[in-house]
């Protein structure tokens, strides 16, 4: 929004003060508040972006306020049936609520994980419900800088599609990590021996548990039935292996390969995920150059570098972004050897 509409005033509201400090100091927003209701009554557009349960609570709060009659309210929550139900009192009052959901993101959470190009080329579901066309168009114009592909659906269509393509995979990834952890508990190196296969299928198990708790509680019926169909697939391949049914095993993998090969990277939606290192740097000239020179000398290329001044100590925090986790971890070793303190990696 900021890049496409520099004149728009953006007020950020959150319950975590450090998040508000970061948003303000990085100039992501013009102003911050913890008083959602007071900010809401003066807003022309309200974008709800907490966990789904919080979005539903916020919609209930908004229904009690004297909002501007022309306000456009939207959300980015990962489920839509319960969100649209929570928005009904607002829609019945004639206020415009347009449900939204960008089909992009990552296993990271928090304000620091955001990027201006996060949604580029991704599908963005719109669920207008009773909202007038003009409100939908106003929202699309505001979000033009996201460069998304819009897709209008009903809440039911949304939850079925996203249950299968996002919610079920998160359950599968987390279950596999938990089961592997238990199965290898007696092995000294255990999970650390995992190569690309395990890491590719389980990246999303690093996602925020609070967010996923909320998603599954709000799309439970859909996901449990999809989970049963998935369990049936597992049972079928288990039986084929037990029976040494070679053609059946081959057919299982061949069908999956054909489908997956047609889902080229160009169809995958958003840009690839990036991997961050946060380190303390002294507040002195040449400090950033020292970091970049050490990484260049070690042959490690970085994607982006960003100075964060979110704390009141003398040191600043530098966010260095890499294209893959291995390069980030090598960079961490190189910098630690030079006495840099790594604050966090994600
Ligand atoms: N992560 C993804 O890949 C992704 C993609 C599309 C949609 N979504 C949806 O977007 C929403 C936000 O997800 P995210 O990944 O940006 O999470 P996030 O944790 O990065 O951001 C959520 C923010 O909401 C704040 N918050 C929590 N409770 C609050 C409350 N009661 N009042 C005000 N603020 C509160 C948190 O402090 C945090 O800053 C969720 O509904 C999620 O389902 C996530
Ligand atoms: O790429 C990831 O890590 C994501 O989990 C993003 C993802 C997804 O499942 O695809 C997660 C939740 C959303 O509602 C939409 C997108």
Image: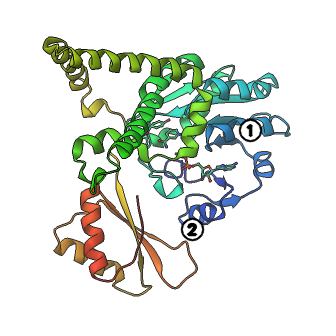
Asked if residue 346 lies left or right of residue 302, the reply is right
For label 1, the SS is helix
Which residue occupies the foreground of this view, 139 or 130?
130
- Residue 25's mark? 2
Which residue occupies the foreground of this view, 76 or 178?
178
The quarter of the displayed image where residue 286 is located: bottom left
Q: Which residue is mark 1?
A: 57
Q: x and y percent of residue 35 in the render?
A: 77, 55
Q: Residues within 10 Å of mark 1 (few under 14, many from 20)?
A: some
* Residue 50 visible in the displayed image: yes
Q: Quadrant of ligand 2?
A: top left
Q: x and y percent of residue 310 in the render?
A: 55, 71
For label 2, the SS is helix
Q: Nearer the viewer, mark 1 or mark 2?
A: 1
Q: x and y percent of residue 108 in the render?
A: 45, 50
Q: Residue furthest bottom?
A: 284
The quarter of the displayed image where residue 95 is located: top right
Asked if residue 56 lies left or right of residue 278, the reply is right
Asked if residue 185 lies left or right of residue 93, the reply is left
Sequence-wise first label, 1 or 2: 2
* Residue 323 visible in the displayed image: no
């Amino acid at each position: 929004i900021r890049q496409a509409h520099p004149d728009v005033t953006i007020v950020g509201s959150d319950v975590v003060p450090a998040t508000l400090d970061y948003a303000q100091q990085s100039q992501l927003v013009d102003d911050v508040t913890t008083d959602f209701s007071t900010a809401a009554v003066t807003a022309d557009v309200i974008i709800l972006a907490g966990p789904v349960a919080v979005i539903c609570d916020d919609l209930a709060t908004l229904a009690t306020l004297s909002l501007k009659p022309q306000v456009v309210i939207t959300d980015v929550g990962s489920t839509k049936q319960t969100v649209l139900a929570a928005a009904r009192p607002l829609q019945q009052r004639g206020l415009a609520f347009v449900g939204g959901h960008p089909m992009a993101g990552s296993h990271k959470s928090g304000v620091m994980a955001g990027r201006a190009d996060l949604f580029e080329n991704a599908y963005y579901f719109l669920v207008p419900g009773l909202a007038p066309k003009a409100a939908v168009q106003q929202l699309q114009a505001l979000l033009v800088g996201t460069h998304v592909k819009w897709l209008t659906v009903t809440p039911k269509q949304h939850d079925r599609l996203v249950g299968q393509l996002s919610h079920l995979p998160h359950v599968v990834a987390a279950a596999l990590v938990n089961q592997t952890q238990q199965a290898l508990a007696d092995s000294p190196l255990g999970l650390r021996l995992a190569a690309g296969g395990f890491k590719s299928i389980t990246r999303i198990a690093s996602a925020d548990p609070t967010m996923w708790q909320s998603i599954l509680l709000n799309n439970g019926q859909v996901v449990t039935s999809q989970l049963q169909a998935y369990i049936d697939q597992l049972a079928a391949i288990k039986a084929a292996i037990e029976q040494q049914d070679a053609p059946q095993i081959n057919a299982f993998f061949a069908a999956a390969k054909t489908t997956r090969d047609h889902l080229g990277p160009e169809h995958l939606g958003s840009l690839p995920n990036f991997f961050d290192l946060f380190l303390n740097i002294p507040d002195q000239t040449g400090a950033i150059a020292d970091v970049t020179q050490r990484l260049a000398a070690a042959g490690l290329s970085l994607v982006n570098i960003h100075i964060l001044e979110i704390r009141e100590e003398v040191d600043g925090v530098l966010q260095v972004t890499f294209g893959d986790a291995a390069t980030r971890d090598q960079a961490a070793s190189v910098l630690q050897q030079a006495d840099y303190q790594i604050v966090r990696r994600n």
